[in-house]
Structures are given as structure tokens and as C-alpha cells.
Amino acid sequence: MGPVGFPEMTVIFVVALVLFGPKKLPELGRMLGKAIGQLRRVQRELKATVDRELQTLEREAGHETKAAVDPLEASPYGERERLQVRTQ
């Protein structure tokens, strides 16, 4: 289905004018505009949330990879330093 051209828009406008009348048409246009704006806002928020969660997962995956290579180095508690102090 291709883009809606001028002739199609004219037909849609005339049908809407006949169905709803000239007094209701501006109100319907405002409602439609608000609904589209709200949908776009929700879409942006959802995308931002998904991106943020993906970044968090990538960071956690990177930390787990580092822990798999050297568990003492990746430890947030500084286990390597504690072990070195104990052995000296």
C-alpha cells in the first residue's frame, strides 16, 4: 500500500465532512492530533527504556566476561588486594 496522495485525502475529507459535519470536524482533528502526539511520546519513552535496559545488560555481560577471565580482578570487593596482603 503506497502513500496517500491528494485525491485520496480529498475523498477522505469529504466523507468525514459528510459523516461528522462542519462543527465536529475541527474537534475530531484536534483529538486525532493529540492521540498521535501521545502515541509518539509513548513510543519514544518505550524506545528509551529498551535502549537503557540493553546498555545495562551489555555492561553486566562485560563485567561477567571479565569475571570469567580473572574472577579476583573483576571482584568489586578487592579480593586480589586482600589476598596479597594476607600472603605477605
Image (cartoon, rainbow, N blue to C red):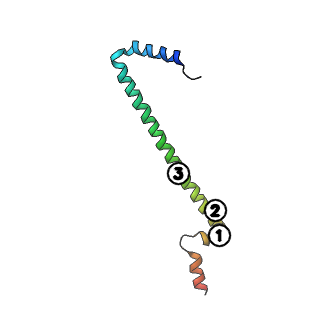
* Residue pictured at 37% horizontal, 27% vertical: 30
Could you tell me residue 61's position as x and y percent?
Answer: 60, 58
Which numbered marker is on residue 70?
1
User: Quadrant location of residue 42?
Assistant: top left
Q: Which residue is mark 3?
A: 53
User: Considering only vertical position in the picture, is 35 above or below 10?
Assistant: below
In the drawing, what numbered circle is on residue 65? Answer: 2
| Outermost front residue | 6
Q: Amino acid at mark 1?
A: Asp
- Distance from Cα at disc 1 to Cα at disc 2: 9 Å
Give the tally of numbered discs: 3
Is 44 on the left or on the right of 25, as rendered?
right
- Tell which circle, 3 or 1, labels the residue nearer the N-terminal end: 3
Residue depicted at x 47% and y 16%: 12
- Residue extending furthest toward the right: 69
**How dense is the environment of label 3, judged by Cα within 10 Å: few (below 14), some, or many (20 and up)?**
few
**Dot 1 lies on which element?**
loop
Q: Residue at 59% across / 55% down in the picture? A: 58
Q: Amino acid at mark 3?
A: Glu
